[in-house]
Structure formats: structure tokens, C-alpha cells
Amino acid sequence: MAAEYTTLALTEPSEQLLQVTLNRVQASNAFNTQMARDLTDVFEAIGLSPNQHRVVIVTGRGEKAFCAGGDLKERNGMSDEVWQQQHLVFERMARAVIACPVPVIGAINGAAYGGGCELVAALDFVYAVEHARFAQTETCLGIIPGIGGTQTLARAIGERRAKELILSGRPFTALEAMEWGLVNAVFPTVELLNDAVLDIAERIAANAPLAVRQAKQAIHKGQQMSLSDGMAFEVEAYNRLVSTEDRLEGVLAFNEKRQPVFTGK
């Protein structure tokens, strides 16, 4: 992971948290090729060093937009070959985000359109500001969602609702997104990061990191299996934790009536 990126701002609200801020505010934080490369680098690095941070927060710069999707100014006049080469970068980015072993929480600070909405659906769960708006507008441009949107959005809100939104391209509000299951909760702007998202991130970070990662994986993988296969996968994930130092610490701390100190071992 690089120390600095041209399209992202990385900060650590605490020792255990990493905040990734999309930082192309002049372009409504739209993806260009460099942003996709930068996000890929960040999330692949987290995958290689999952003990460095316990929770990742993703948000956008400013109050107008979380991410306006693919940068159509950059794409204007692209040949088919260059377009497809760029899209391979976008695909790798989406896979890196979805495969991230630690929890990734969205703080959706504004509009999330096109690829921005796909990014929202790729995160583990999200909180949004009241004025946030969402849309999968690709069919209005002659394409379809291509970094997981037809899959992740349908899994989040159901097949029939996803068809309605993707086929029409119509925008929907933060409250609708919460009602349908894409957004977990809606907050005023002043509360989103400093109160709501940081509070839940710190609560997760205080738990045993190996257990959190195994639980995340069991939930995600289990959704793609039959119930019996998912339960078998869960037991395998559970058994990996029995011999850990954190499991011993958790039980000991409970009996000693104190807060556990988890080390990720």
C-alpha cells in the first residue's frame, strides 16, 4: 500500500481503523482508471496484511457525492479496446473490495450512481446521509452494471427490486435504500462519520479480529451455498477459532468480569 494516492485520502481515525476517502471531488468522486488502480492497491494490500487494521471505512470527499460512477469524460472517445482494458481494471478493483478479509463499512455521504452504487453494494454494510441518492444508470447509457451490480444489488435488495431499478435506471432515496436493505441506517450529515460509522467500527474493532473475519467469511460464502453446506462451512470456520489465544482470552475475561484484550492470535 502506497503512503499517498492521487485519487484517495487514507487516514486512521484510530490505531485499528483505516478510512479510505474517494478524493476526486471536482469530478463528484467518479472512478477514473487511476482511482480504480489506487483502490485495487489499497484493498489487495489489506488482503495481504489483514492484521494491520481491523475495520475499513469507505466514504467520499464533500457532501455532494459519494461516487458518481465511471468518469464519462475520461471515457469519451475511447476505442472499444481501451474501454475493455479499462474495465478489466474496474473488475479487479471490485473483486479486491469484495474479497477484503476485514469488515468494510460504507459511510455514504452523497450521491452514489452507476459504479458508485455498485461499490455501495459491494461493501459489507453501509450507513448513509439523509440526502444520499442511489441509481444504477447503466442501461441509460447503452451498457449494464459491470462490476458486480447485477449480482450484489440483487443479493442486497432482492431480484425483483433489482430488476426494477437496473432496467429503469431510476434514482432512489436513502430512505428507500434503507427500506429495501441496501442501506442499514440513515443519519444527518453531522452524525454520519463522527458518531454513527465510527461507533459501529470501534465496536467491531474491539471484538476478536480472527472471529470477526471468520464470521464475515461464513456469512458471505454461506449465502452462495445451500443451507446444509453453509452450516458445514460455518462449523469449519468455528473450529478454526477454538485453539486461538483470543478464544482463551475471551472466556477468561468473561469470568474475570473485565473487558477482553484481543491480539488477533
Image (tube, rainbow, N blue to C red):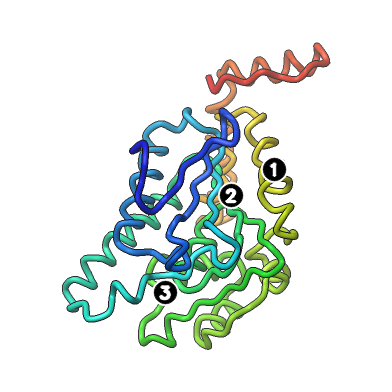
Sequence-wise first label, 3 or 1? 3
Marks 1 and 2, how far apart in space? 9 Å
Image quarter for residue 130?
bottom right
Image vertical order of residue 132 relative to residue 242, above or below: below
Give the residue at the far right of this rendering.
Answer: 257
Which residue is labeled 3 in the image? 145
Under mark 2, the amino acid is: Ile
Q: Is residue 251 visible?
A: yes
For the point 67% across and 15% down, the residue is 249
State the quadrant of the N terminus. top left
Foreground tag (3 vs 2): 2
Q: Whole-percent x and y of residue 89?
A: 28, 59
From the viewer's side, name the closer residue of 122 and 227. 122
Q: Mark 2 points at which residue?
A: 105
> Relative to the observer, which residue lies in front, 16 or 182?
16
Relative to 85, does residue 228 appear above or below in the rendering?
above
Sequence-wise, which precedes: disc 1 or disc 2?
2
Residue 200, disc: 1
**Image location of residue 214, percent across then percent down:** 55, 37
Q: Is residue 65 left or right of residue 1?
A: right
> Visible in this render: residue 213?
no
